[in-house]
Image (tube, rainbow, N blue to C red):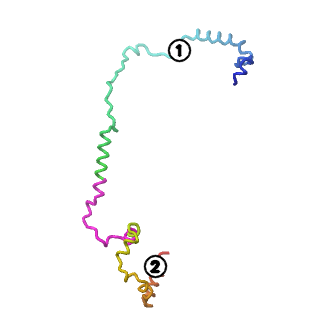
Amino acid sequence: MKNENLHSIKGSGFKIPQNYFEGLEDSILSEAKLKNLVSDSGFKTPEGYLDNFTVSVKKETKVISIFSKKNILLVSSIAASLVLFFSLNVFKNSPLSFNDLDITTVDNYIIDETETGDLTTLFQDNELSETNFIEYTLSEETLDSYLETIVVDDLFLE
């Protein structure tokens, strides 16, 4: 509501139902009479019930939190030592050899970690000539056996 229109408001803004105050006095008086007539609540206790009634209050016990800083450090150090113990290959005594390496792993390592300049130093110039690749001939038996293995492998893979 804007402040400009405050001076023009004539009503209070509150509404009551019709004939509300006509029956209000009668309902209040009837309720008061009923309360005077019924002084008893309706609940009864046996005689002497509360004479020997005692409540024992226990001493407060000290609460020890499970998640204290000391316990968290202890549990995490035990977990870290177990992970370290099993990751060190304690139970496996066989040494690794080049035969254990996978060919694709070695190929990926060479591709990712070396540059072409590094590879050119490994080969002699006469080993990389085009004539070695062009003049290389295969016998028909070798080619047939190779193609048969490829076809057989492809059939079994599907």
Q: Earlier in the sequence, mark 1 or mark 2?
A: 1
Q: Is residue 149 above or below residue 16?
A: below
Residue visible at 28% across and 70% down in the picture: 97
Q: Is residue 10 above or below residue 98?
A: above
Neighbor class of circle 1 (other Cα within 10 Å; few <14, some 14-19, many 20+) is few
Instruction: Return the residue nearer the eye: 137 or 68.
Output: 137
Residue furthest bottom in the image = 140
The magenta segment is 83-109
Q: How far is disc 1 from disc 2 in space, using C-alphas?
A: 96 Å
Residue visible at 48% across and 78% down in the picture: 154
Q: Assign a secondary structure to mark 1.
A: loop
Residues under numbered marks 1 and 2 in contact, where contact means CB atoms less than 8 Å apart: no
The residue type indicated by label 1 comes to: Ser
Q: Is residue 93 left or right of residue 29?
A: left
User: Which residue position is annotated with label 1?
Assistant: 41
Q: Is residue 14 above or below residue 119?
A: above
The residue type indicated by label 2 comes to: Asp
Q: Position of residue 145 (x, y in %)?
A: 43, 86
Q: Assign a secondary structure to mark 2.
A: helix
Q: Is residue 28 left or right of residue 62?
A: right
* Residue 117 located within the stretch drawn in magenta: no
Instruction: Return the residue nearer the eye: 28 or 157.
Output: 157
Q: Which quarter of the rendered picture does the N terminus lie within?
A: top right
Q: Is residue 9 above or below residue 94?
A: above
Which label is found at residue 153? Answer: 2
Residue furthest left in the image = 93
Name the image quarter holding residue 14: top right
Instruction: Return the residue nearer the eye: 103 or 157.
Output: 103
Q: From the image, state whether disc 1 or disc 2 is nearer to you.
A: 2
